[in-house]
Amino acid sequence: MAHPTQLGFQDAASPVMEELLHFHDHALMIVFLISTLVLYIIVAMVSTKLTNKYILDSQEIEIVWTVLPAVILILIALPSLRILYLMDEINDPHLTIKAMGHQWYWSYEYTDYENLGFDSYMIPTQDLAPGQFRLLETDHRMVVPMESPVRVLVSAEDVLHSWAVPSLGVKLDAVPGRLNQTAFIASRPGVFYGQCSEICGANHSFMPIVVEAVPLEHFENWSSLMLENA
């Protein structure tokens, strides 16, 4: 969950998000080292009294400033490609959920069940209970079992939307007429908040996403109760 004055990312709640945090630290370290080196060179050039007016070219320097950036880019690209392949893998999901974007709410359908689906609307500020978060709470949460692979099929009914939950490392465009898919594993129980991340009209800021990860036994009890009330 994000909080005021936060400078870093939200706490990871999935293996993919943990990999993304590690990659961020890796890339940031490289950028910091490059910035330090460039700053040192600039200060050294400005402060030195040594000059050389006669060097017109240098094969050694050209080799260094060609090879070194290439090596740095490879060091950044390889971990990035690894994470991309990890995010693209969807192996034997235990549960499939279809998330459909509308103006301005989300609807969810649990396709492994015959009649389990609901719409998820934002709770207005005046109806919030103590301790709930403004503009982030919904009347129905997307409940998933923790430590189980969950596949999410994402599309839209009207205009472009985007289904995003930062703690789970998930962000997927919802395009009318097209079905995109992603997968995640919630590594711990909790309630994880997200929002539509594609400007979709006047109430774009008022269609939050709430994913609740619970133990498998609690998920089975919840699904049974939802099917009874359907």
Image (cartoon, grey):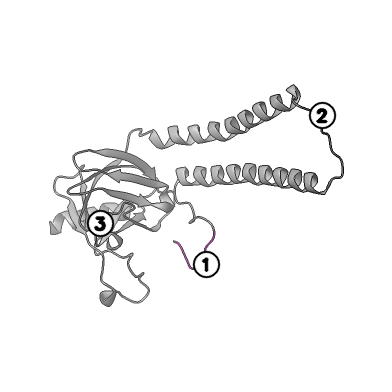
Q: Please identify the quadrant where the C terminus is shown.
A: bottom left
Q: Residue furthest right?
A: 49
Q: CA distance from mark 3 to mark 2?
A: 79 Å
Q: Nearer the viewer, residue 105 or 69?
A: 69
- Decide whether residue 167 is among the magenta residues: no
Tell me the amino acid under the disc marked 1: Thr
Q: Position of residue 224 (x, y in %)?
A: 20, 54
- Decide whether residue 3 is among the magenta residues: yes
Q: Is 162 drawn above or below residue 193 in the view shown? A: above
Q: Which of pointers 3 and 1 lies earlier in the amino acid sequence?
A: 1
Residue located 18% across and 52% down the image = 117
Query: Residue 5's mark?
Result: 1
Q: Is residue 79 left or right of residue 141?
A: right
Q: CA distance from mark 3 to mark 1?
A: 36 Å
Query: Residue 54's mark?
Result: 2
Q: Position of residue 101 (x, y in %)?
A: 23, 51
- Element at label 2: loop
Tell me the amino acid under the disc marked 2: Tyr
Q: Is residue 100 left or right of residue 25?
A: left
Q: Is 191 drawn above or below residue 175 in the view shown? A: below
Q: Which residues are magenta?
A: 2-7
Residue bearing mark 3: 222
State which mark lies toward you, 3 or 1: 1
